[in-house]
């Protein structure tokens, strides 16, 4: 998951240090590539995401009974976590609701070939 501005530019998707190792192993380089899912594929993903977010919030708040929802979202907004793009993006969106939520595939171009290694998702848009 990531956020886009009104011009379709990706915002609020951190470039984590861990990605450098993945790019080296996979023979990739450059900036992340994105392909948003559409139609039923996007709807199904968003439905699953909704349940996952609620579960994560419930568990976190159970372990930290004094934590408020506002504090939960502030944590992910101020401290993006590798592997938690959904929570990172939603936390940023809660303060920037003019941005568009996107769900789909993310990866990098393979060096010298132009093909994309999709680290997350399958690279297909859906229907």
Image (cartoon, rainbow, N blue to C red):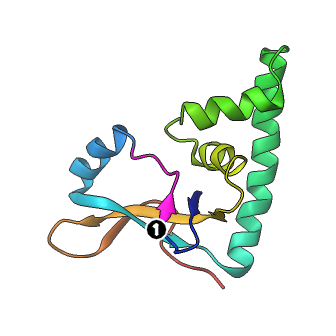
Q: Which of the 4 image quarters holds residue 78?
A: top right
- In the picture, which quadrant includes the N terminus? bottom right
Q: Secondary structure at mark 1?
A: strand
Residue 87 falls left or right of residue 30? right
Residue extending furthest bottom? Answer: 127
At which x and y percent is residue 53?
76, 43
Task: Give the residue at x 78% y 31%.
Answer: 70
In this rendered view, identify the residue nearer to me: 108 or 90.
Answer: 90
Q: Residue 104 in the image: x percent, y percent? A: 57, 66
- Residues shaded magenta: 10-15
At 24% across and 76% down in the image, what residue appears?
114
Question: Which quarter of the rendered picture does the C terminus lie within?
Answer: bottom right
Q: Quadrant of residue 41?
A: bottom right
83 is within the stretch colored magenta: no
Where is residue 13? Give x, y as percent. 49, 51
Most frequent secondary structure within the magenta stretch? loop
Q: Which residue is mark 1?
A: 34
Number of labelled discs? Answer: 1
Q: On the rendered structure, is 69 left or right of 20?
A: right
Side of 33 relative to 124 (left or right): left
Foreground: 99 or 19? 99
**In which quarter of the view is residue 33 placed?**
bottom left
Residue 96 vs 83, above or below: the answer is below
Mark 1: give few (<14), some (14-19) or many (20+) Cα within 10 Å: many
Location of residue 120 in the rendering, given as x and y in whole percent from the top left corner = 49, 58
Is residue 70 shown above or below 3? above
Q: Residue, x 33% and y 70% (percent of image)? A: 116
Image position of 84 (left or right of 35): right
């Amino acid at each position: 998951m990531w956020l886009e501005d009104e011009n379709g530019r990706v915002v609020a998707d951190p470039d984590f240090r861990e990605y450098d190792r993945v790019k080296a192993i996979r023979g990739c380089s450059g900036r992340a590539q994105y392909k948003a899912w559409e139609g039923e594929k996007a709807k199904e993903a968003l439905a699953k995401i909704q349940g996952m977010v609620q579960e994560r919030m419930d568990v976190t708040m159970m372990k930290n009974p004094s934590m408020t929802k506002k504090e939960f979202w502030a944590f992910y907004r101020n401290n993006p976590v590798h592997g938690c793009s959904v929570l990172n993006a939603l936390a940023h969106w809660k303060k920037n609701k003019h941005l568009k939520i996107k769900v789909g595939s993310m990866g990098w171009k393979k060096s010298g070939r132009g093909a994309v290694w999709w680290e997350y998702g399958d690279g297909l848009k859906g229907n």
